[in-house]
Amino acid sequence: MTKLSVNVNKIATLRNTRHYEVPNLERLARIALDAGAAGITIHPRPDRRHIRPGDVPKLAKVVAEFPDAEFNIEGNPFGAEYLQHLANVRPTQATFVPDADDQFTSDHGFDLSDPQVCQSLKPKIAEVQGLGCRVSLFLDPRPDLVPHAARLGADRIELYTAPYAQAFPTPQLNSVLELYIQTAQAAVEHGLGVNAGHDLSLDNLARFLSSVPKVLEVSIGHAFIADALEFGMAETVRRYRAITG
Ligand SMILES: CC(=O)[C@@H](O)[C@H](O)COP(=O)(O)O
Ligand SMILES: NCC(=O)COP(=O)(O)O
């Protein structure tokens, strides 16, 4: 079984277009968890395009209402505000993503083949683990990066799945999937957990999970929230859980 973590960024995007709490982020997160989502993911960005600083402790409180639920906060570990969020709420998991402040969306993982990247990440990983958070590193599907992630002491990697989503269902799919399979296998061999996310959907999720081994968690937001506009949060959780198990 793969855990489903619902990324609620895009609820906040809609909320931010009025000066009042509609849609209500906490209420919809609670509905998702009550319907069986294993956790909530957010990616507070410096420009506050969706998740705002005040949302973070409120969502932490909602997740804490569900004993087994996990809170996953994504962000750039070299951003002071992100580290402050982690120190304030100490989420279950911190997913480090190398996004620039003004990036349109996440579109690449860390290049751990660069010694300077690894040298700068190592203390950040230790610092955040010291808060009691599990640390996951956002990576492109490159098996060669896995030994570096292990040496850095990361707990998990998160496979950046937009290249998979873009290849689905083209003739190139199998060759693209092979990279994810090899990276996931390498992670397991190096004692790292495997997460996955970005542009996963009801259409492409089953093929990914049936091909790539040992995926512990998928975090899904954009397509999930679009689906929830059509089916509602609870039914959408049920439809994704029918795939994740
Ligand atoms: C890291 C990742 O792939 C996504 O979780 C990211 O949170 C998407 O960010 P936006 O919702 O701002 O596009
Ligand atoms: N880590 C991926 C995530 O949280 C959501 O990504 P997306 O489904 O919004 O592309």
Image (spheres, rainbow, N blue to C red):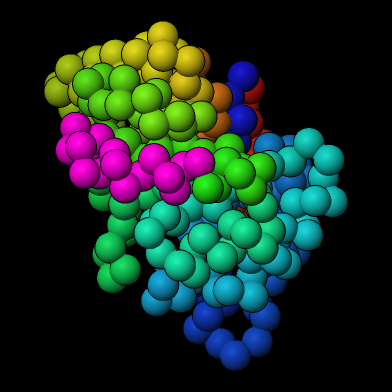
Task: Provide the residue span drawn in magenta.
Answer: 109-126
**Residue 117: percent from left, percent from top:** 25, 44
Q: Is residue 38 magenta?
A: no
Query: x%, y% of residue 190?
Result: 41, 14
- The image position of residue 16, as x and y in percent, is 53, 80
Residue 130, relative to residue 141: is it above or below? Answer: below
Q: With 185 as the anchor, is 112 left or right in this view?
A: left
Q: Is residue 42 left or right of residue 108?
A: right
Quarter of the figure with residue 23 = bottom right
- Regarding residue 159, the answer to whether it shows in the image is yes
Q: Is residue 221 above or below residue 143?
A: below
Instruction: Decide which of 122, 172 is in the foreground and name it.
Output: 122
Q: Residue at x 31, y 52 (%)?
A: 98
Residue farthest toward the bottom in the current orientation of the protein:
19
Q: Is residue 244 visible?
A: no
The spot of residue 138 in percent (x, y) is: 37, 40
Residue 115 magenta: yes
Front one among 29 and 114: 114
In-image side of 110 versus 175 (left or right): right
Residue at 78% x, 36% y: name it: 68
Image quarter (top left, top right, bottom left or bottom right) of the N terminus:
top right
Q: Residue furthest left?
A: 172
Prevalent SS, magenta region: helix
Q: Residue visible at 47% across and 42% down?
A: 125
The answer to which of 62 and 112 lies nearer the viewer is 112
